[in-house]
Structure formats: C-alpha cells, structure tokens
C-alpha cells in the first residue's frame, strides 16, 4: 500500500505544479485586459481579440426659426429685457450680410446695433421713431435699407451721408415731413405714404443723384414736383396736392427738340390737376403721364 501511494505522489504532484503555473500566467493577462477596457475604451473578447472603438462624430445642429423665436421669448420672460437690450441676432434673424428685424416683439423703437458685415437691413413694421447720424455711421457697406411701416417722423440730415454704397432706400408708410440728404449712388427711393410737403424737400436733393432710376413719392402732401435727374426711369407722385405743372417740370421749355428718352412711367393720378391744360409739360416724353385729363 505504501508503495502505491509513493508512485501516485510522483505522478500527480508534477501535474499540479504545472497547472498552478499556467493559471498564474493567465490571471494577470485577464486582469490587465479588464483594466485596459475600463480606462482606454477598448473592447475585449476572451483573451485573443482587441478592437479600438471609433470616436463618435459630433454633429452641430443649427436651430430653426421656431427655436430662435422660443429662445428670444425665454430671454425676455426670464430677464425682463427690452428689445433694445437684447443682442441683435437674438432679437432679429441674421444671415450672411443680411439682418431681418420685422415685427419684433417686444417693440423695436430704435435701429439696433448691426453686425459689421451687414449689407442688407430689413427693419419693417416696428416702432422706430427717429433715425440719427449714429445709427448707420459705421456700416459703410450697406446696400439696402428697408424701414417700411414704422413711425419715423425725423431723420437727421447726415444719417445716410456716409453710406457710399447704398442703392435702395425704402421709407414708405412712416410720418416723415421732410427728407434728409441722400447718398450719391442711390438707385431707388420709396417714400410713399408719408406726410411730405414741398418745403420739406430741398430743390437740389434729386438733381444730384445721377444714378436715381426709381422715385416713389405717392400719397404725400406735395404741392409741386421737385427737379428731377435725367437718369430717372419711373416716378410715382400720385395722390398728392399738385395743382399745376410748368414746361420745365419734365421737359426743357426752351428746347422743342429735347426728348426725355429715359423716363418711361409718370403717375400723376389722384392730384387736383387736369393734365390736358398743360400739354407742353410732357411734350418731350415718350408716353403720356397717368392721370386726369378732363
């Protein structure tokens, strides 16, 4: 019996030592992989497979118009700010080179600070009452300003003087009684539906605008038509208080051969004026003015 136990010991003990050594080599590797998985973002599959996880791409979402409106309303509700206190591009919609401030809530009462790159401003249907020389002083690349539907009663004389690139100016549906000096490169001026009177328009204000093509002065209180530039294509001066014309209003009374070829459309309807009584006033035109002839 003792001999059998001795033989068994010689056979089993070497095998147990080998198994223990093998386990001691394996366990550190498993622990190392687990630690690597925890701290370095790798995935383990048993003992033989490692895969580096790909980093997720970050996608920046651009808020839609409704989100912008909600953000603005939240800022107003939580801070109690007025329109002029809010950042312009939260109060308005800012795109590359364009700013849209239309029917702003709360009411916009002054021209807001604009991004430096602003070339087109649409600030329609607000409560802006006055335009000062400071409002556009630093925005020399402006090409279009639309202030339709405000309550503007005063524009300081130098408010647009530095806007050498301004081509379109819309001041319709306001309360203006006079016009300021206008930039030299202006192509279109719309001042329909104001309170303009002849004494509020300097005699040379339009004559100096060599590129002016479209002039809209309808629904005002003008008594006479101011001197017009040769470049003019369209003039609307309907629904005013014009009672008379002269031979020099559109033509040159001392030159019967003069033809005003550029001027294509003249609206004089709605004035207390009978055009048939002034035939020499538009003899140089290619088309008769629109208005009352009987």
Image (cartoon, rainbow, N blue to C red):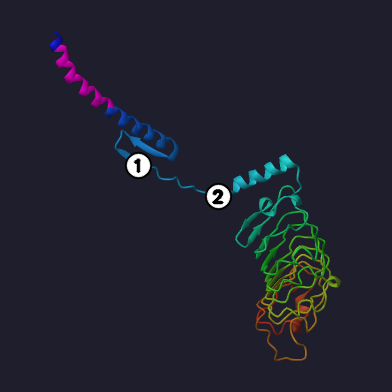
Q: Tag 2: Cα neighbours inside 10 Å, few (<14), some, or many (≥20)? A: few
Does the stretch in magenta take in 53? Answer: no
Under circle 1, the secondary element is strand
The x and y percentages for residue 208 are 75, 80
The answer to whether 208 is drawn above or below residue 291 in the figure is: below
User: Disc 1 and disc 2: Cα gap in Å?
Assistant: 34 Å
Q: Secondary structure at mark 2?
A: loop
Judging depth in this view, the residue of 277 and 220 nearest the camera is 220
Number of numbered labels in the structure image? 2
Q: Quadrant of residue 76?
A: top right
Read off the residue under disc 1: 51
Whether the residues at callouts 1 and 2 have beta carbons within 8 Å, the answer is no
Mark 1 is surrounded, within 10 Å at the Cα level, by few (under 14), some (14 to 19) or many (20 or more) other residues, namely few
* Sequence-earlier tag: 1 or 2: 1
- Tag nearer the camera, 1 or 2: 1
Look at the magenta stretch and give its main secondary structure.
Answer: helix
Pinpoint residue 212: horizontal percent, then vertical percent.
Answer: 69, 76
Which residue is located at x 21 percent, y 20 percent?
Answer: 13
Point out the image quarter for the C terminus: bottom right
Q: Residue at x 70, y 89 (%)?
A: 258
Q: Position of residue 287 (x, y in %)?
A: 66, 79
- In the drawing, does residue 260 fall left or right of residue 28? right
* Corner quadrant of residue 197: bottom right
**Residue at 70% in and 74% down:** 164
User: Residue 169: x percent and y percent?
Assistant: 71, 67
Residue situated furthest top in the rendering: 1
The circle drawn on residue 277 is: none
Q: Residue furthest right?
A: 199
Instruction: Give the camera-side residue of 294 and 12.
Output: 12
For the N terminus, the quadrant is: top left
Span of residues in magenta: 4-20
Q: To which residue does mark 2 refer?
A: 62
């Amino acid at each position: 019996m003792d001999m059998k136990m001795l033989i068994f010991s010689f056979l089993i003990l070497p095998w147990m030592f080998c198994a223990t050594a093998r386990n001691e080599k394996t366990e550190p590797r498993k622990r190392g992989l687990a630690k690597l998985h925890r701290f370095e973002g790798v995935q383990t599959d048993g003992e033989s497979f490692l895969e580096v996880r790909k980093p997720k791409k970050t996608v920046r979402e651009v808020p839609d118009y409704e989100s912008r409106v909600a953000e603005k309303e939240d800022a107003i509700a939580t801070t109690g700010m007025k329109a002029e206190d809010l950042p312009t591009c939260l109060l308005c919609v800012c795109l590359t080179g364009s700013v849209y401030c239309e029917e702003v809530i709360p009411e916009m009462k002054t021209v807001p600070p604009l991004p430096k790159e602003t070339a087109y401003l649409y600030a329609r249907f607000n409560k802006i009452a006055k335009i000062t020389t400071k409002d556009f002083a630093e925005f020399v690349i402006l090409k279009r300003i639309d202030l339709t539907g405000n309550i503007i009663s005063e524009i300081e004389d130098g408010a647009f003087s530095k806007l050498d690139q301004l081509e379109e100016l819309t001041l319709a549906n306001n309360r203006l009684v006079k016009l300021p000096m206008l930039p030299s490169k202006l192509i279109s001026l719309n001042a329909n539906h104001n309170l303009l009177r002849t004494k509020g328009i300097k005699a040379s204000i339009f004559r100096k605008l060599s590129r002016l093509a479209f002039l809209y002065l309808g629904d005002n209180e003008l008594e006479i038509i101011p001197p017009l530039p040769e470049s003019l294509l369209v003039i609307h001066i309907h629904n005013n208080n014009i009672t008379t014309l002269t031979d020099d209003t559109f033509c040159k009374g001392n030159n019967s051969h003069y033809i005003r070829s550029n001027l294509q459309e003249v609206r004089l309807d709605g004035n207390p004026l009978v055009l048939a009584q002034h035939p020499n006033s538009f003899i140089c035109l290619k088309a008769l003015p629109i208005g009352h002839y009987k």
